[in-house]
Amino acid sequence: MLLNKKIPMKYVLGKIRTELTLVILFCIAFQIFHYYFETISINIPIAIPTIIGTIISLLLAFKSNQAYDRWWEARIIWGSIVNDSRTLLRQIIIFYNDPDFSVQANDFKEKFAKRQAAWCYSLGQSLREKDPIKPIRDLLDEDELRFVKKHKHVPNAILLLHAKDLKKALNTSKINVYQQVEIDNTLSRLCDSMGKCERIKNTIFPTTYSMYIRFALCLFIMLLPFGLINIIGWLQIPLVTTIAVAFFLIEKMAIHLQDPFENRPTDTPVSAISNTIEKNLMQMVNEYRDEFDEEVPVYESKAHHIQPLNNAYFVL
């Protein structure tokens, strides 16, 4: 996730530096050839590249819309994860039978809150194909860490730990069967959200579609100087370069948006969302202190890391 609102132009153009360099070299070479071989007619009607450009514009618009739909769906799913995480802990706090406000009950609720925050962090890291254990070491105890390390799918293992604790609470009459069903429904929604994220991650955008667009775009850029050379002369160099930059940036934007879990600036900000969830859950657990003994402390997350990269700041 890009945190700096002012994106450097160097960073933007750096995404298409190769394409930009090739376009400039091609335009300069074309101008030099026209200058020394002016007697050879190399111009074509401007209508030909115009028609191709119109087709490319429609294809890029369609691709951008499809890519944005994938990105927006991922953001909606993580919005649901935020809501269900808060709902889960609220149910644990309210349903858990503890008239004496015992330390054991508070430990149970705090353990549940930390484990749910760990689930969010591990899911985000798994979707980005990074180590899902690293950001959750401070949120799980040794037994839980030992348990999740045995599983290839860490977020699913954490949900299993949730279910095991719910069963223990039911067996010890801390919750009744109806409350257990309600909490289990919330866990099912979290599992559904996890599956939806994995579907987006594992569904590859058709490569042939991107290849055809790139081929048509290159053909358009190569034909454009032929239609402009007799109209504006050497000014075709900056004009063709500017048009190429616009088209290539739109294409690159669509490519980035279509994969919202690749740890890029345009990604769904899963780390920032997980950090917010962690703070919210821990404040919910510690809410009772304001009533009974002391002021609620401001909870600071230890699992959230921000590092500078390319003159901008990204959530990793």
Image: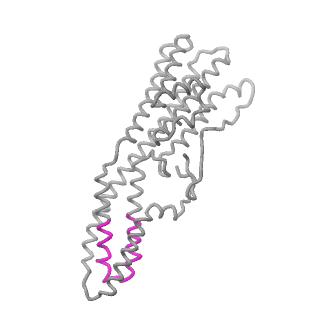
At 46% from the left edge and 18% from the top edge, which residue is drawn?
181
Residue drawn 43% across and 42% down? 74
> Residue 272's x, y, as percent?
55, 43
Q: Position of residue 59 (x, y in %)?
A: 30, 58
Q: What secondary structure do most residues of the magenta stretch adopt?
A: helix
**102 is higher (above) or lower (below) than 9:** above
Question: Which region shows up in magenta?
Answer: 218-247
| Image quarter of residue 33 | bottom left
| In magenta segment, residue 287 | no
Residue 228 part of the magenta-drawn span: yes
Q: How many numbered marks does the figure carry?
A: 0
- Is 305 above or below relative to 94? below
Measured along the vertical axis of the image, is residue 166 above or below residue 273? above
Q: Position of residue 94 (x, y in %)?
A: 58, 21
Extreme residue toward the bottom, this view: 39
Does 71 sit left or right of 39 as displayed?
Answer: right
